Amino acid sequence: MRMRGRRLIPIVLSLVVIVILCISFITNQLRENVPQRDAYLLHLPPIKEAATAATTIADAAALILPSAATSPGALLNLTDFNYLLASDVCRRAERELLGVLIVTSYAGHDSLRAAHRQAIAQSKLAELGLQRVFLLAALPAHERFITQQQLVSEQQRFGDLLQGSFIEDYRNLSYKHVMGLRWAATECQQHAKFIIKLDDDIIYDVFHLRRYLETLEVSETALATSSALLAGFVLDAKPPIRLQANKWYVTRQEYPHALYPSYLSGWLYITNVPTAARLVAEAQRVPIFWIDDTWLTGIVRTRLGIPLKRHNNWFSANSQFLDCCVRDLKLHNYECEYFAGPNGGDAKLLIEFLHNVEKCYFDECLKRPPGKSLQQTCLATVKSPAPEHGIAHIQPLRLS
Ligand SMILES: *[C@@H]1O[C@H](CO)[C@@H](O)[C@H](O)[C@H]1NC(C)=O
Ligand SMILES: *[C@@H]1O[C@H](CO)[C@@H](O)[C@H](O)[C@H]1NC(C)=O
């Protein structure tokens, strides 16, 4: 009996492999036969009217799903929106993903994206149950350093770009942000539990992030699957900048009130598909405000009554601290006290940080001993700004 059973195993396995090959072949054939592959990805239908009638969360999620493959695209009030480059990282995923990282990136920041890929490759992210896509917009006419053809090549090589047809500008970041959330909530709906939004100039501990998401998944609270998950760096009651000379100057027409509602810093925050779907649907009904994180996780969120989950202790506004973390990880295997923060203009810091922090994920790190906190041991000579608007943390600077 045992012998026969053993001999059967290779036969059964071969059969399974043959069936899988057949299915994937047929699927590919079908895909190829669709005149415009991923046609519905490229032409998302307008969702404005339907959004008004949304009553339940399920409705809200259904609304932003592309219904008719041929309807013209729209994004908020951009009626002629479409994707110049589209990614299918979620659909390509072989198993359910823990999360998808949507990284806001200025199209010209190709070296910063290269640093992200060098810090952790898509294949390695896949091992952690994660995938990453960069959110870009169209190159402005004055862009001198990069061409659309270069972006096309980058896409051919990595397939991780999602480029909207609106023009790159910090005043267009709200479009980009909604584009990313909508894409993740529709394209990754079946595939990813969590959505992590971050900026391309942010250092983040992806291993810590993964651990957090796993804990969230098994925690008693239903937060992970609820339609009210927004976690990150909470900024409370910030006043708009009213100094005309400031890049982040906000007129009273744009925002009349003295204070913003609490919001999450766009540096890095965590949400999920049902929550993103609600935000995107509600964003259709709220006048667009160009400061994207304040608008979506503040103004739009407040209308939905979604509370914010505070993880401010994860973040360091001071890139010097993250630099010191790398030093101490190398020298002493000390755990870093922070898990995210801006790179302070150093594109390579993310690579160093991730390559060194990985060992902590395998429990090979030590807690920092008393008296050896970063505050005490790291000479913070260069002070980085706090994550408020008024500072050039999303400035499209050229890094290569
Ligand atoms: C969309 O709305 C914004 C903000 O209200 C406005 O400035 C812009 O001109 C509008 N764009 C279009 C294409 O209607
Ligand atoms: C934002 O994108 C729109 C659509 O492409 C474009 O018309 C507009 O000029 C952009 N805004 C800025 C400030 O560049």
Image (cartoon, helix red, strand yellow):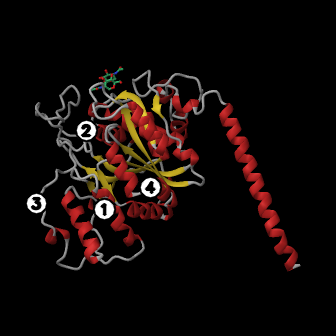
User: Separation of disc 4 and disc 3 at Cα?
Assistant: 32 Å
The residue identified by callout 1 is: 352
- Decide which of 285, 92 is in the foreground and name it: 92
Q: Answer above or below: position of 377 versus 246.
A: below
User: Separation of disc 1 and disc 4 at Cα?
Assistant: 14 Å
The residue identified by callout 2 is: 396
Q: Answer above or below: position of 244 versus 121.
A: above
Residue 94 percent coordinates (x, y): 60, 53
> Dot 2, crowdedness within 10 Å: few (<14), some or many (≥20)?
some
In the rendered structure, which amino acid carries the disc numbered 3? Thr
In the rendered structure, which amino acid carries the disc numbered 1? Glu
**248 sits to left or right of 94:** left
Q: What label sits on residue 121 in the rendered view?
A: 4
In the rendered structure, which amino acid carries the disc numbered 2? Pro
> Dot 3, crowdedness within 10 Å: few (<14), some or many (≥20)?
few
Residue 76 percent coordinates (x, y): 40, 27
In the rendered structure, which amino acid carries the disc numbered 4? Ala
- Residue 110 can be seen, yes or no: yes
Residue under the image location 52 percent in, 39 percent down: 61
Q: Quick one: label 4 or label 2, which is nearer the N terminus?
A: 4
Q: Kindly indicate the quadrant of the structure image that contains residue 375.
A: bottom left
> Dot 4, crowdedness within 10 Å: few (<14), some or many (≥20)?
some
User: Separation of disc 4 and disc 2 at Cα?
Assistant: 24 Å
**135 sits to left or right of 310:** right
Residue at mark 2: C-beta within 8 A of ligand 2: no
Q: Which one is in front in this view, the residue at disc 1 or the one at disc 2?
A: 1
User: Separation of disc 1 and disc 3 at Cα?
Assistant: 20 Å
Residue 361 percent coordinates (x, y): 40, 70
Of the 4 image quadrants, the one containing the N terminus is bottom right
Marks 4 & 3, CB-CB < 8 Å contact: no
The residue identified by callout 3 is: 381
